[in-house]
C-alpha cells in the first residue's frame, strides 16, 4: 500500500480537477470533490501499473511540502 498527496483544484467550467505531484502527468477530474478523489485513486493505480510494466521503480513521495503563506494585498 502506498500513500500519495493529491491536490484538488476547482475547475473553471465547474467540478474539480486533481493531480498527484509525486507522479508527473497523473491527474483526473470529477463533478464533486468525492468523485475527483475516487477518480484520481483510479488514475494513480493505472499510472503505477504502467510504471511497473515498464520495469521502472515505483516513485516514493518525498520532499513535498504543502503549506499556506500569508501575503499582503494592497
Image (spheres, rainbow, N blue to C red):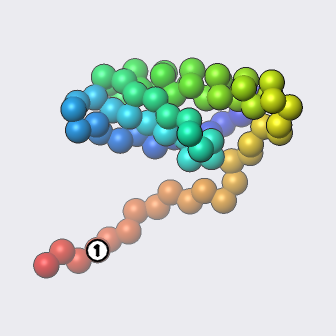
Residue 55 quadrant: top right
**Residue closest to the eye, 2 or 26:** 26
Residue 27 drawn at (x, y percent): 50, 34
Residue at the outermost right position: 55
Q: Is residue 6 left or right of residue 56?
A: left
Residue 29 drawn at (x, y percent): 40, 28
Q: Which residue is mark 1?
A: 71
Tell me the quadrant of the picture where the N terminus can be found.
top right
Tell me the quadrant of the picture where the C terminus can be found.
bottom left
Q: Residue at x 65, y 28 (%)?
A: 47
Q: Residue at x 18, y 74 (%)?
A: 73
**Residue closest to the eye, 50 or 4:** 50
Q: Is residue 56 left or right of residue 33?
A: right
Residue 26 quadrant: top right
Q: Residue at x 48, y 22 (%)?
A: 39
Q: Residue at x 46, y 29 (%)?
A: 28
Image vertical order of residue 31 relative to residue 59, above or below: above
Residue at the outermost front position: 54
> In what element is the residue under mark 1?
loop
Image vertical order of residue 10 relative to residue 54, above or below: below
Residue 9 drawn at (x, y percent): 35, 41
Residue 48 drawn at (x, y percent): 70, 29
Q: Is residue 27 left or right of residue 16?
A: right
Amino acid at each position: 500500500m502506498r500513500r500519495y498527496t493529491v491536490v484538488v483544484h476547482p475547475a473553471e467550467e465547474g467540478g474539480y480537477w486533481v493531480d498527484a505531484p509525486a507522479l508527473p502527468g497523473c491527474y483526473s477530474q470529477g463533478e464533486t470533490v468525492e468523485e475527483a478523489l475516487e477518480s484520481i485513486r483510479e488514475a494513480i493505480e493505472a499510472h503505477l501499473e504502467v510504471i511497473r510494466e515498464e520495469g521502472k521503480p515505483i516513485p516514493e513521495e518525498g520532499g513535498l511540502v504543502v503549506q499556506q503563506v500569508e501575503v499582503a494585498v494592497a
